[in-house]
Amino acid sequence: QGRQVKDKMEIVSRVVNEQPRVLRDAEQVLKLAHFLGLASVSEQLAVREHLARAMLSGTVGVGGEAMLLSEGEAEVKELMKAGRASIWDLAWKLAQTQTVAVEQRRRLAAYAMAHCPGSELETVRSGWKELGREQRLGPQVCA
């Protein structure tokens, strides 16, 4: 059946969407993608982006949300290092997450600001400034 599917990314998407437990082992999904022929750097980054989006979607079963948030954050950081502009929205989503340290949230917001479409720039810039204020004054003062 896998040979009949022209878009190999579709197989990866199906696996992730139909069996969300695989999100707990991203390396196995990356190996599957490689086995399917998605081996180039850009294809592997696309698979990582798909995984990060799934991890941060908030539709995971009982007890897995915190772990997947952490894994999703790690994937986003790797994608940021690779300069993947299309993940600006994931960086912005994490920047708004209270469980992430303020300094890291500010870096995430800066990345989002650098890569977001013009229509979102003012919103992201405002959030980035607020995080800077929170970083200087502490979260209790800004609340």
Image: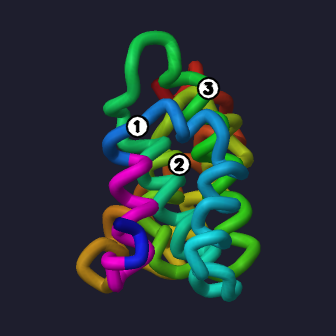
Q: Between marks 1 and 2, how big is the CA–CA gap?
A: 28 Å
Q: Which residues are magenta?
A: 4-16
How busy is the neighbourhood of tag 1: few (under 14 within 10 Å), some, or many (20 plus)? few
Where residue 63 appears, as percent x and y from the top left, is 50, 12
Q: In the displayed image of the protein, which residue is found farthest to the top?
A: 63
Which residue bears the numbered disc 1? 19
Q: Residue at x 67, y 49 (%)?
A: 28
Q: Mark on residue 67? A: 3
Where residue 126 appears, as percent x and y from the top left, is 41, 60
Which residue bears the numbered disc 2? 95
Q: What secondary structure prevails in the magenta region?
A: helix
Is residue 35 visible in the rendered image? The answer is: yes
Q: Residue at x 53, y 74 (%)?
A: 46
Looking at the rendered structure, the secondary structure element under dot 2 is helix
Give the side of residue 143 with respect to residue 4, left or right. right
Of residue 110 and residue 52, the one placed in the foreground of this image is: 52
**Mark 3 or 1, closer to the camera:** 1
